[in-house]
Amino acid sequence: MKKERSNTKLKKPKVIVCFALAALTAVLFAPIAIYEVHTQENASIHLSVTPSKTKVVPGTPVSYLYNATNTGEVPLTGNITDFTFGVVGAFVNLQPGGWVGYNVTHVLTQNTSNLVTAYGFDQYKNLATDSDSAFVQVYSGVDISLTVTPSKTLVLPGTPVSYLYNATNTGEVPLTGAIIDDTFGLVGNFVNLQPNGWVGYNVTHVLTQNTTNVAKAWGADQFGANVTDSKTTFVQVYSLISTIESCNQNGVKKDYFVVGNELYVVGAGYLPSTTYDVYLVEDVTWVDGMAIPPRVVNSTATVTSDGNGDIQPTLLWDDPLKQGKYDIIVDVDGDGLYYAEADALDDNDVEVTAGLFVVPEPAVIACMFACFSGLGLFLMRKRKQL
Ligand SMILES: [Ca+2]
Ligand SMILES: [Ca+2]
Ligand SMILES: [Ca+2]
């Protein structure tokens, strides 16, 4: 019995030790077990950033597509941050396999590189992160310049006006596609315009009313970057009845002048505050389309209308005047040619062929009269003496 009791006493410590070891093992390995459970659920995220364009000219809007995908096994909560443009957006409890996308547009004015990072935490504060980057080249090497030159800027209704269009590649790269159009429609298109190269077009339109012409030239480089230039021209179409008339310094009509007088002109029916070419010429017969003859030496070359479109008395020719018949013309449309419909003429006052007449001074006439009279008396006396 004693031995048996003794055996019993000996067995109890072994059981206790076994339990103790088991407990110790449990305590020691429990954290590892918990850790292993947590890390077995992989927290992972994938991020991509994609700009809509990678080569643009300054001022171009570029949209960036940010896309974050939960590639792990646990839901994630976090955000996407663009270190160039700021926080893009947040996501909450993004499930495994799920994704979140943001589309943000920025206007770029210079080369732009941006680093983007997505942060996501699972319920155990395990961090999952991923980064991506993008680069957009903003370059000013693409450019185009347009000039538009109308042949006339002041015309009568129905006048043909030719427009000269000139587009120049002022950039550093070839323009693979380009076009010019305007208020009237397509002017022309061209391809592969080299740097410093240019194209020109000449198109004629018959204008019947005031015409504002907005012309544009577009070009694109091999990457599709667009450049444009625009020019606006204005052609005034008028239907005035302009007059010009010889007069004295007070504006009183006068057609006969003597050497020593001052010759003035007065007019009406002009555009306000506009300067015109005026010609005092020797009497001619005017025919539509003829070139305006040279003006009399030392006569005034221009007249300017006032705010009402009137030409106030303007000195046209100073002393000494040269005896003869003269006409006066204002080249209203500035083409150097005479057209009855366009220009103002003083041509119908003296013997219905001239605008004015410069005659000798009265003293000269009196002298001539006296001389002729004296010569007459002398001859009569001679005859009597004979
Ligand atoms: Ca003319
Ligand atoms: Ca004449
Ligand atoms: Ca006259």
Image (cartoon, helix red, strand yellow):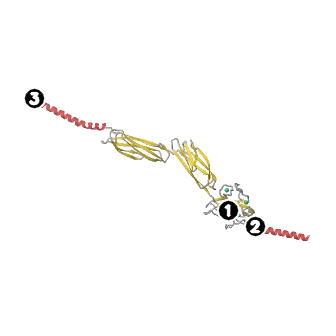
Q: Looking at the rendering, in which quadrant would you find the C terminus?
A: bottom right
Amino acid type, residue under disc 3 in the picture: Glu
Residue 4 circle label: 3
Residue sitting farthest toward the left: 1
Please tell me whether residue 272 is drawn above or below residue 2 in the rendered image.
below
Q: Nearer the viewer, mark 3 or mark 1?
A: 1
Q: Quadrant of residue 67?
A: top left
Check residue 244 in the rendering and tell me which mark sits there, or answer none: 1
Residue at the limit of the structure toward the right, as seen here: 386
Mark nearer the N terminus (2 vs 1):
1
Between the residue at mark 3 and the residue at mark 1, the CA separation in whole angstroms equals: 154 Å
- Residue topped by disc 2: 361
Say what secondary structure mark 3 lies in: helix
Quadrant where the N terminus sits is top left
Number of the front mark, 2 or 1? 1
Under 8 Å from ligand 1: the CB of mark 3? no
Judged from the image, the quadrant occupied by ligand 2 is: bottom right
- Percent from the top left, x then y, of residue 194? 57, 42
In the image, 385 versus 122, the foreground residue is: 122
Provide the secondary structure element on which disc 2 rests. Answer: loop
Q: Nearer the viewer, residue 188 or 63?
A: 188
SS of the residue at dot 1?
Answer: strand
Residue 254 is left or right of residue 36, and the answer is right
Task: Estimate the x, y position of residue 256 in percent, counting from the top left.
Answer: 73, 66
Identify the residue shown where x is 42% and y is 43%.
65
User: Does 353 sit left or right of 4 as displayed?
Assistant: right
Whole-percent x, y for residue 12 in the image: 14, 32
Instruction: Choose the circle earlier in sequence order: 3 or 2.
Output: 3
Q: Residues within 10 Å of mark 1 (few under 14, many from 20)?
A: many
Classify mark 2: residues with Cα within 10 Å, few (<14), some (14-19) or many (20+): some
Residue 226 visible? The answer is: yes
